[in-house]
Image (cartoon, rainbow, N blue to C red):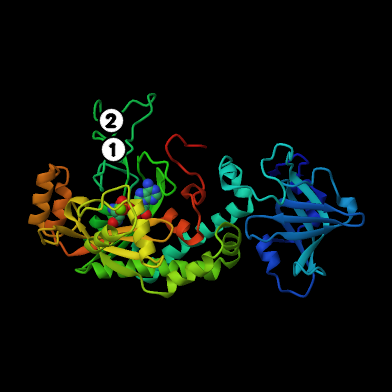
Amino acid sequence: MLAVGKLGIGLVSRCPWHRCHRSLTKLSVQEALSSHSENTKKVKIQGWVRSVRAQKEVLFLHINDGSSLQNLQIVAEPSLQHSSIRFGSAVEVSGALVRSVGTKQSVEVKAEDIRVIGECDTTDFPFKIKERHPPEYVRQFPHLRCRTNTFGSLLRIRSAATAAIHEFFRNNDYVHIHTPIITSNDCEGAGELFQVQTGSKNPAPGDDGGFFGIPAFLTVSGQLHLEVMSGAFKKVFTFGPTFRAENSQGRRHLAEFYMVEAEVSFTENLEDIMKVMEDLFKTTTSSLLDKCAEDLALFFKYVSPGQKERCEKLIANKFIVMSYTEAIEILQKAPVTFQYSTEWGCDLQTEHEKYLVKHCGDFPVFVVNYPYDLKPFYARDNEDGPRHTVSAVDLLVPGIGELFGGSLREERLHILQSRLDRLGLANTYQWYLDLRRFGSVPHGGFGMGFERYLQCILGVDNIRDVIPFPRYPYSCLL
Ligand code: 4AD
Ligand code: MG
């Protein structure tokens, strides 16, 4: 086995250093930090240098390997000092894990050997030691920003939130479905589609119809595929990348984002769907507050002071519910001038959503029963009038506005058929109509924007700072 690095480790089997270090326990920084053993342990730690402090008699290093926000302190004889041990360089430290005499950490490693695996050219490295860089600056380096403390914490929180969401659904007996990324449907009917084509060097098998013989797109939602599954499974969910060709530079829009979607069969009540939405939000948030306290504390201290108390308030109280009609009445009575119309029938814009959330005491609010013409063909007709509505719901949250969108689905064949006929979509959606022919049941579901959820919990202003590699108009770096 050949290892890499300027100062090279060489062939392991021939390396005397490696032979004598085989008895070392390899630990992550997190494992080392949480070690409670009173006995000295011989360990090997690998990571990147976050700080170097050379004193006359002793060399202090702090290293990090992504497993925790906290760094591990390494204490070494000055003889182990080497010019390539610098901020950003990758190192492997062997030594004794001992109780620390310092007050800032409980353990430290007394180094017997420090090997530099990869040097770092600090003159060109864009991040400076101990400096807090503004997000707009950090965003310019999508290939390096995971090395900053804030982005490191974000990525650990994102990973924990993904696991908590899967756990929520598993604990509630949902079946996870991998819905396709390439699809021939436009679920939302908004035309915000990215079309999939082969590159010019790979001629498509079908001449005009392209690779698939029909137009194909990146999915805007896995809902219709979940609805297929909800004809055989009472509870299903999906959680994957979703694409929208929305020409928006806004702070809550991405061209590629992750959506959590669920579908529940044998449900006649929008409240049942809203309960799942609220439970998902609260359970995931409680889990994060419990499991990611240290990483969250960084956000609560430097990015969004006061956010911890706001999060605790979000999970402690029941979300508010109001109808679209009530929302419009509130907006019409508002002592502010909105840029967009507040007539009954108009779509709620960000400015309206923000006002409604403020009106509710900066607290989440479900808005239910939207005008028929505002929602896609699948939303269940309330058959009311003259203000004709559907059983659809959006959850609006502080700092973001719309976080979830959901509805009961139209399960009655004749009503769905006539709506699709009017839209000229009946041929396209024969298979969807089939679902209403063969054992149709009342059902409903929702989608939650995962990045907007993270923004809401962390108090992060721009959605581009909660996803590893953001895609938006004129930007597809890496
Ligand atoms: O409201 P939307 O469009 O609903 C649907 O797609 C439904 N088919 C979901 C379902 O019922 N299964 O999208 C759901 C959520 C929004 O509330 C928002 O949080 C997020 O997805 N979202 C976006 N997030 C980031 N960037 C964008 N461009 C987004 N568009 C929607
Ligand atoms: Mg929506």
**Residue 249 visible in the shown view:** yes
Image height of 231 relative to 219, above or below: below
Q: Which residue is mark 2?
A: 210
Residue 24 is situated, as x and y percent measured from the top left of the image, at 75, 61
Helix, strand or loop for disc 2: loop
Residue 166 is situated, as x and y percent measured from the top left of the image, at 42, 63
User: Residue 75 appears in which quarter of the rendering?
Assistant: bottom right
Residue 266 is left or right of residue 153, and the answer is left
The amino acid type of the residue labelled 2 equals Gly
Residue 429 is situated, as x and y percent measured from the top left of the image, at 16, 46
The amino acid type of the residue labelled 1 equals Ala
Q: Which mark is residue 216?
A: 1
The answer for how far apart the CA atoms under marks 1 and 2 are is: 8 Å
The reply to whether the residue tagged 2 has its Cβ within 8 angstroms of ligand 1 is no
Residue 240 is situated, as x and y percent measured from the top left of the image, at 39, 52
Helix, strand or loop for disc 1: loop
- Which residue is outermost to the right? 56
User: Do the residues under discs 1 and 2 have CB atoms within 8 angstroms?
Assistant: yes
For mark 1, does the 10 Å Cα neighbourhood hold few (<14), some (14 to 19), or many (20 or more) residues?
many
Q: Nearer the viewer, residue 298 or 358?
A: 358
- Which residue is outermost to the front? 335
Residue 336 is left or right of residue 433, and the answer is right
**Residue at screen point 70% across, 45% down:** 128
**Residue 260 visible in the shown view:** no
